Image (cartoon, coloured by chain):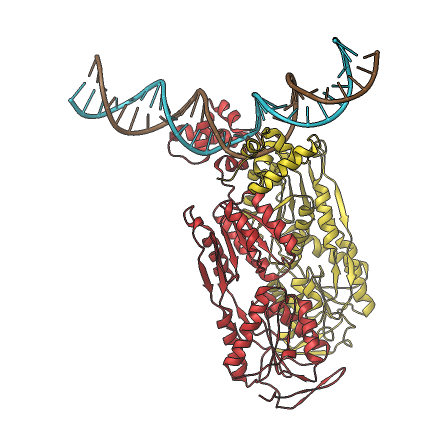
Chain colours: A red, B yellow, C cyan, D brown
Amino acid sequence: MPLNIRQVAKLAGVSNATVSRVINGSDLVTPETTQRIRRIIQELNFVPNRSAAHFKRGKSQIYGIIVPDLTNPFFMEMVKIFEELLVENELELLVANTDFHSSRTQRSIHRMLLRRVDGVAFLCSEQQAASLESLVQNRIPVVTTDHHRTAIGISDIVVNFRDGMSQIVGHLKELGHQNIGFIGGSEGLATSRDRRDTFLNAVVKFGMSSRDRWIVAGDYKISGGTAGMEAILDQDEVPTAIVTANDLTAIGALRKAHEKGIRIPEDISVTGCDDLEISDIVYPPLTTLRISRRQYAQMLFDALQIGAEELSQPGKVFSLPMQIVIRQSTGPPRAHGGQISLGNGAVTATRTPR
Amino acid sequence: MPLNIRQVAKLAGVSNATVSRVINGSDLVTPETTQRIRRIIQELNFVPNRSAAHFKRGKSQIYGIIVPDLTNPFFMEMVKIFEELLVENELELLVANTDFHSSRTQRSIHRMLLRRVDGVAFLCSEQQAASLESLVQNRIPVVTTDHHRTAIGISDIVVNFRDGMSQIVGHLKELGHQNIGFIGGSEGLATSRDRRDTFLNAVVKFGMSSRDRWIVAGDYKISGGTAGMEAILDQDEVPTAIVTANDLTAIGALRKAHEKGIRIPEDISVTGCDDLEISDIVYPPLTTLRISRRQYAQMLFDALQIGAEELSQPGKVFSLPMQIVIRQSTGPPRAHGGQISLGNGAVTATRTPR
DNA sequence: AAAGAGCTTGACAACGTTTTCAGACTGAGA
DNA sequence: TCTCAGTCTGAAAACGTTGTCAAGCTCTTT
């Protein structure tokens, strides 16, 4: 039912080619003709069918973003900023959420392929490299995050978690902590294992100590934080500080601590990672690691702006800095050996013999 | 560079029509032929170009959602659930965020038009009816939220805020409160004024009282809550309970209270609206009004599934219930006339003479 | 054996644009 | 006056798919 370019052309007494040129701002058309056609378009309320145009051009002007958890404010903000970046460039955004399910991930990738998007930002750290390659085979640029590997046409943005962990663990060391626990992400994800190992390296590097039973997995959500905190607090001895894989986890840990009557940071210090807006709102405000979302999104966008030649070459790796933000969830440890009284009994916070 | 249906057809020794039929699961094709073509598609890694198909069919199979603030967990969850609904139906989602800017809203609507989406869920309550009509003129169904008006082809989902307010104010009344303040949304938005009036009506209905100076505007964000709380606390007399327009505002209020050393709910009760996930996590957990996001999203989706005939008729209005969730941010008021000591001076909580 | 029904397939014209190529002007230079 | 370059415009062929229509089969049925 909507008008098409040919009808506009007929009314204007020109050919559709001329109308097309006006729409696309070509300078080949006389100013007078341009004016006249513009006016007619206005009068008719004509809106060109951009999908037809992009179909013809073979470029959809649509980008896709695939995230594991839209509910996580971090990814939501990434989506938001990425969208802003695209709108500035007259581009459109298709959003896919996988909820950490690999089948949904596969399907999301396939959907992007079906739509022939012009690029895919893949923010799931799970290794689905095989499916991603199907995108590249179809000449669609891909950028991943924290995959720590690149392939033909696939670039990778890695956050410098090693440096971040140094800042966090260093900060705890300065405060006088010696025994640190860790609540990570889901054990199945490569990033989770990676972050845990990075944490352990930092602990060793600073001459501090941890224990196997203080290292627990989570799920990058609040629930993982509460469960992880509970698991750690159930031990006979508990660490004086707990580092977590992201802010949601830390918030969950805070909540469980509050429930058990444990004071943060007086009894135990807790740190997060991401610096969400709410992390400054929760009680106590979180000490965490900040990643610039704008910089991150810009890197994603830039990495997707590659030409046909580059698409046949190995992707590049970009590194994103992290910056510690010190708030009130960290503080000096209790005097060694002090008792933390819990609702369910007493737990001793001790120094672990080396 | 990617293959097209004709090349597949040639390799299979059939016509492109047959391949098309196989792709679309038509039962007109012999099982053997279907198998053969399927195998070839598999071998070639052929992915049909769905945009071409949708262009041809005149249906994009893409829906658009326009939200005012992607950063707000409420909208974020709505986007998430809406996306799930669409994926189940093999549909795609285009996301637009307006940040409450009317120019960005206009542009978002126009973008949807350019793309010829199959429907638009417009979650901004600002009255942009004029632009929305341009969608309908182009045969694109639209559903709005809380516009309290429908137009040809535009349905509206309204949350039953009146009932919600009754529950909230009634709850406060039961606790013994008499003087209530209100922190709303941005004054420029129709919903904000609407919610404020609904609040005032409930106050009158329950025979309670408020004051002009206890009724302040916010911005539906945390910042508006902190500012609004500050404005109210700056008064000579403060209410014993504060109702807010959404959870983020309430969280901002909580934060400001905490900063000023005011205890919630001992000194002042605070209520929110939305029941965000974090609302159960903040301290103290918020008493708030719950809206079922799933039901909401489903309503949006259903409202968009209308035929050509209905598109020429006035849209329908759907009502969404709200349910009070009582947590720890509300409690009985202080004994009347009790002093609340603030960092910046003393403020009396009194009963307002009727 | 002819006719008809039912099933499977192919040819071809769309869909609304962009883009190439050539044609029609104009004005300047020879 | 003729030619040539330079502007502007139009005709027509794509792009990859779907869907209509007709045609070719194979069975029945008469």
Q: Quadrant of residue B50?
A: top right
> Could you tell me residue A241's position as x and y percent?
60, 80
- Given residues A6 and A316, the one toward you in this image is A316
Q: Residue at x 68, y 52 (%)?
A: B81
Q: Residue at x 72, y 69 (%)?
A: B285
Viewer can see residue B45: yes
Image label count? 0
- Given residues A144 and B209, the one toward you in this image is A144
Where B77 falls versus C1 (above or below)?
below
Q: Quadrant of the C terminus of chain B?
A: bottom right
Where B23 falls versus A236 (above or below)?
above
- Given residues A6 and A344, the one toward you in this image is A344
Viewer can see residue B67: no
Q: Quadrant of residue B161?
A: bottom right
> Could you tell me residue B305's position as x and y percent?
71, 39
Where A125 falls versus A201 (above or below)?
above
Q: Using residue D6 as the reference point, say whether residue A193 is left or right of it.
A: right
- Given residues A82 and B23, the one toward you in this image is B23
> Could you tell me residue B138's position as x and y percent?
61, 34
Q: Residue at x 57, y 85 (%)?
A: A178
Where B354 falls versus A174 (above or below)?
above
Q: Quadrant of residue B109?
A: top right
> Could you tell me residue B74's position as x and y percent?
67, 57
